[in-house]
Structures are given as structure tokens and as C-alpha cells.
Amino acid sequence: MGVLSGGHLFTDVSQGSVPALLPFLNHLSDASLGALVLAMTISSSVIQPVFGHMSDRRSLPWLMPLGPALGGLGIALAGWAPSYGLRFAAILLSGIGVAAFHPEASRFANYVSGERRASGMSLFSVGGNLGFAIGPMILTPLLIAFGLHGTTFVLIPTWLMAGVLAFELSRLRGFRRDVVGGRVQRSRQPEAWRPFWVLAGVIAARSFVYFGMVTFIPLYYRDVLHASRSLGGWALSAMLVGGACGTLIGGPLADRFGRRTVLISSMCLLPPLVVGFLLSGPALAVLFAAVAGAATIATFAVTIVMGQEFLPGRLGVAAGVTIGLSIGLGGVGSPLLGLIGNAAGLRAVFETIAALPLVALALTIALPRGGTIARGEQLETQGEQQETQGEQQEARGEQQETQPARRNPQPATR
């Protein structure tokens, strides 16, 4: 799990590096810079289900080392690209690496976790949270020191991690039990597509909340609270750190109290936390931002596991949708919330963000109470027990035929 989480960290460093690169591209317009962010968002999220579908049909563990390798290579080439078109293509390449990594790595995180799937997925997910957060911390000093060519140094951590993943592939393959003779054996457990798409709606609403807060918290501090930019940055950092802590806490809670219970609790907590943020001064709002980040991201790993439990035979597709959808829809949601801000102000933006968890809550309540995978395992266990009982009865019958029955056994003699 440490290897998988480390791979997640250095793959998502590439995603976090793109926003840090933009201020150093002074010759580009705002629209051109926005298109670069869109290139990373689309390539890293929209095509994730495609890679997931491929990994459901064939065993493709080599996609895991390919992820950080391509992610880092794309960022490195973006600093050397002589034209905007080539820079756009380099960031697309980086996003494809990110998309290739997540479905297959999430599959193996499911395998390695054993029965405590949510706890294991939390450890896997927190790597991605940290990677996205430290991407700017790594790239910005390099760009200041070496200019755009400083992106080359991103190859060092990302390619080292790719080498570690490649070295560990043989051991990771041992956790996969559904490959026989090089072919993937489909699970006999039922797939629940309708609850899965309801869950996708919950993820969409949560993504609007998370990326809306990430985008507009610094602007709210500047334009509404009239605080310094540094304090707005501290509030954003507090939210991201709170999100990482929430990821580690949410998984174990879900294993103990149930996935649906934790998801409902999160959606109930978010509206009052966002309202508390709106009613607070600059200092106290930092605390509300941190707790809101924890409540939001606490369910990130939980929803990945729920998606895989609804589609036990399509773990790659489930991870591609639950992870890729959260990034893709978050990128779409921020401009929509921006339109609300232009029309009614930033307070209206956060009022909308406070209402969105109520939509997610209604959808969560519509989810089935028992996980489909649990029922599938129960039915499979009952079938195995019945088969074992039948074999035992058949064995007793054979013994009765081969051994003469002795109704009145003689007493034993010394």
C-alpha cells in the first residue's frame, strides 16, 4: 500500500504542477492559460474510464509505472516547448499518464486492502491529495531558479517512483486472483448500475463543493473580507490539509460504521460549516475552511470503494468514473459558480455551495442500505457451504457402500 500511495503522490504532482506553471507564462492570454488547465483536466479525467474498461478486460499492471513516467515527462517538456501548440500537447501527454495510473492502481489498492477496503483506499487516496498539494511546492522554486527549463527536474522524483513501481510489479501481481492463463475472469457477483449512477450524482455535487471552495476562498478573503492575500492562502492551505486528514479518518470510520452512514454524515455537516465560514471573521474562517475540507474529502476514498462494490466485476471502470468524474466535474463546476459570482457576488457563490450538499444528501439516502458486494459474497458463501455439504453427504454414502454395516459390534478384546 505504501508503494501504491507513493505512486499516487508522484503521479498527482504533475496535476498540481500545472497551476504553478501558469504565472511564468506571462506572454499568454488568460484564455490560453485556461485552455492549458482544461487540457490537463480533460486528459487526466475524461479518459480514465477508458483505461478502466481496458484493465477490466485484460491485466495491465504496467499502466501503473507508466502513469508517473508520462506525467513527469509531459511537465518537463512543457517548459521546453517552443510553441503554444507543443506546450498544449505536452500537458495533454502528462494528463494521459495521470489517467492511465488511477484505474489500475485503484484496483490493486482494493486487492491489497483485504476486508478493510475503505481504510486501505484512504491510505491510497491521501497520496494523491498530498501530491496535488506539493506539486506547486516542488515546481515553483525550480522555475524561479532555472526559468521554464526548471521543469526538467520534475523528472527526477516521478521517474524514480516509476522505477519503484516497475520493480514491485511482480509482487503486486500476486494480489490479483482473477487472472487465469493470462485472461481476466469476470466476477459472478451482480452489478448494480442504477445505484452506481446515483452515487455518481453524489460525487458530482461533492466535486462542485470542493473545487468551488478551492477556487473562491482566496477571492473571498480578498474581495469580501478585505484580508491580505497571504491569509487567504493560509485558509486555502488549511482546507487542503484538512482534506488530507479527512481522507485518513473517513476510511476507518466507513469500515466501522458503514459507507452510507459516513457519506450521509458528511453531507449533513457541510452546510452548517460553509455557513459558519460565511459568518466568521478572517481568522475564524480559516478553522471553518479546514473542517469543511476534512468533511468534504473524508468521503473521497469511501465513494471509490462504494463504486467498486456496486460494480465488483468492473473495478477499473468504477475507479475511472469515481475518480475521473470528481476531477472533470470539478473543473466544469468552477466556471458555473463563477457566473453566479459575477451576477450576485461571492457570498451567493458560497450560499450555493452550502446548498449543494443537500442535493447530495437526497441522492445518498436513495442508495441501498446494504452493499451489493456483501450480498454477493453472502450468496457465494451459502453456495459454497451447500456444495460442501453435498460433497460430505456423497462421501458418507460411498463409505457406507464400501464398508459392511455392523449393527451389533463385538466388544473389544485385550
Image (spheres, grey):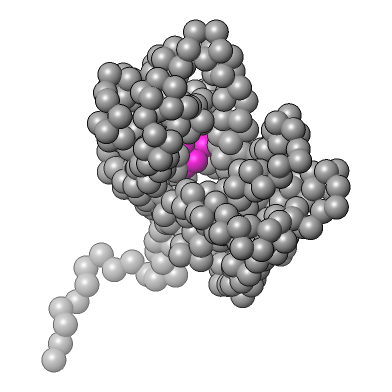
Whether residue 305 appears in magenta in the rendering, the answer is: yes
Looking at the figure, which quarter contains the C terminus? bottom left
Residue 125: where, in percent of width, then height? 47, 49
Residue 116 lies within the magenta run? no
Could you tell me if residue 64 is visible in this image? no
Q: Where 375 falls versus 413 (above or below)?
A: above
Residue 97 image point, x, y percent: 70, 53
Region rendered in magenta: 302-307
Specify whether 143 is left or right of 291.
Answer: right
* Residue 275 visible in rendering: yes
> Measured from the top left, where is residue 413 in percent x and y?
15, 87
Q: Residue at x 40, y 28 (%)?
A: 221
Going 54% across and 18% down the picture, which residue do you hit? Answer: 337
Relative image position of residue 177 (x, y in whole percent): 57, 60
Q: Nearer the viewer, residue 326 or 81?
A: 81
Name the residue at 61% across, 22% down: 335
Q: Residue at x 85, y 43 (%)?
A: 85
Horizontal arrangement in the rendering, residue 33 relative to residue 127 (left or right)? right
How many numbered circles are shown? 0
| Main secondary structure of the magenta stretch | helix
Residue 165's quadrant in the figure? bottom right
Using the image as rendered, state which of residue 40 and residue 268 is in the foreground.
Answer: 40
In the image, farthest residue toward the top = 343
Residue 369 vs 65, above or below: the answer is above
Above-or-below relation of 128 to 371? below
Residue 57 horizontal side relative to residue 201, left or right? right
